[in-house]
Image: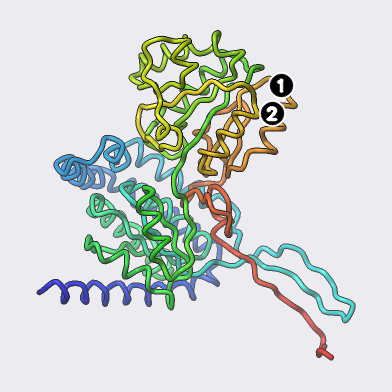
Amino acid sequence: MGGIEEILAVKEMIQGMAREAKLSARQLRTARRSEKDAALDFMAENILARKEEIVKTNAEDVTLARKKGLSPAMIDRLTLDQKTIGSMVAGLREVAALPDPVGEVSGMWKRPNGLQVGQVRIPLGVIGFIYESRPNVTVDAAALCLKSGNAVLLKGGSEAISSNLILNELLAAALRKANLPEKSIQVIPSTDREAVGILLDLDDYVDIIIPRGGEDLIRFVAENSRIPVLKHYKGVCHVYVDEFADVEMARKICFNAKVQRPGVCNAIETMLVHKKVAPLFLPEMIREFSNAGVEIRACEESAKLIPGLKRAEEGDWPAEFLDLILAVRIVENMDEALDHIERYGSNHTEAIVTDNYERSQQFLERVDASVVLVNASTRFNDGFELGLGAEIGINTAKLHAYGPMSLRELTITKFIVFGSGQVRT
């Protein structure tokens, strides 16, 4: 086939999948919790039963990705091992154990004319989920969408296509066993670059798009979609070490926030340090980072305190490195730290380390981010870690949710009204 014919074939395929998803979503609206939870349990069983095959298939994707020169951070996100599979299974079971938000009535009130008015939580409908690298996200997204009563079209990156397809096979088998519509969860099998654009045009079938990946992907989706988009551009996260910080605690938190997994969106990219604590805190902290292979990009004051550090450039402050690189800045006071976060932050995750209660409360009130922490690592901005179960992403826009998107955030409310013959005059 020629190029145009191939594109038309992909378009026809994705449109057909979207129609199936819309029909499935209609059935899922009334699915009982017991049915959805049974499907999630079957998914966990299927993944465990074929985990060796999953790892082998994923290894083929990883090998091809290395040949194509993908970055170490992307390879890390792509790789499925026994630990990752264990986390996927645990996530499925945790979502199954969570309360079902669908059908929850949030308040009822009576009008003077006798009408009873309330709101009930309902699914969003059909979700288009576009993401890069992480095949474990295929399972996380499927679990959350199913439990919240939504059908989902999953468009992963071409680098993970084999991994995603085998996972989709196992998820579909679980749906059949639970007597739920098999097309509730579908991985788009195309690696064609036009596939994302085709999906973004299907506003007759898809209710919302959730992209998860690099900033370029998010911006492309936001700029080209005819469907509402929940977006997370990037994670430029900070830890501010206050003058009243416990120094040992601060070192532990900052090290974890940068080094534990540097290629994820809730890792810190800049560390801000109050000038009064810097002489005590920074030299040992920098040694720990250097021993772990972290490249420091230091402000002028930091470089004076610790000679030999690479000087930071203006472009380092808004950068999402997703690597063992950390920008460091000494600030005069908390106001300067807050100004820096306001200017360069991405509304993702911000943390303060301090033993001063008033400072902690000011930080919580004044910082605009989806999650703000006191005396804890930024790595906790994660649905699983916050007790929400798995998450489908972290929304840094403010419609219709802010922060980790789990079950509740994948639903919305509609009004319900009970009357006894009232008419409007």
Residue at disc 1, secondary structure: loop
* Residue 267, above or below 357: below
334 to the left or right of 162: right
Does residue 177 show up? no
The residue sitting at 43% across, 54% down in the picture is 141
Viewer-side residue, 288 vs 299: 299
Q: Look at mark 1 in the image and give the residue it sits on.
A: 356
- Residue 348, image x and y in percent? 52, 42
Q: Residues within 10 Å of mark 2 (few under 14, many from 20)?
A: some
- Residue 261, image x and y in percent? 39, 31
Viewer-side residue, 172 vs 277: 277
| Total numbered labels placed on residues in the image | 2
Does residue 326 show up? yes
* Residue 5, above or below 62: below
Q: Look at mark 2 in the image and give the residue it sits on.
A: 360
46 to the left or right of 271: left
* Residue 195, above or below 339: below
Q: Quadrant of residue 220?
A: bottom left
Q: Quadrant of residue 82?
A: top left
The residue sitting at 42% across, 32% down in the picture is 314
Contact between labelled residues 1 and 2, with CB atoms less than 8 Å apart: yes
- Residue 271, image x and y in percent? 50, 25
Kind of residue at disc 1: Asn
The residue positioned farthest toward the right in the image shown: 112
Residue at disc 2, secondary structure: helix
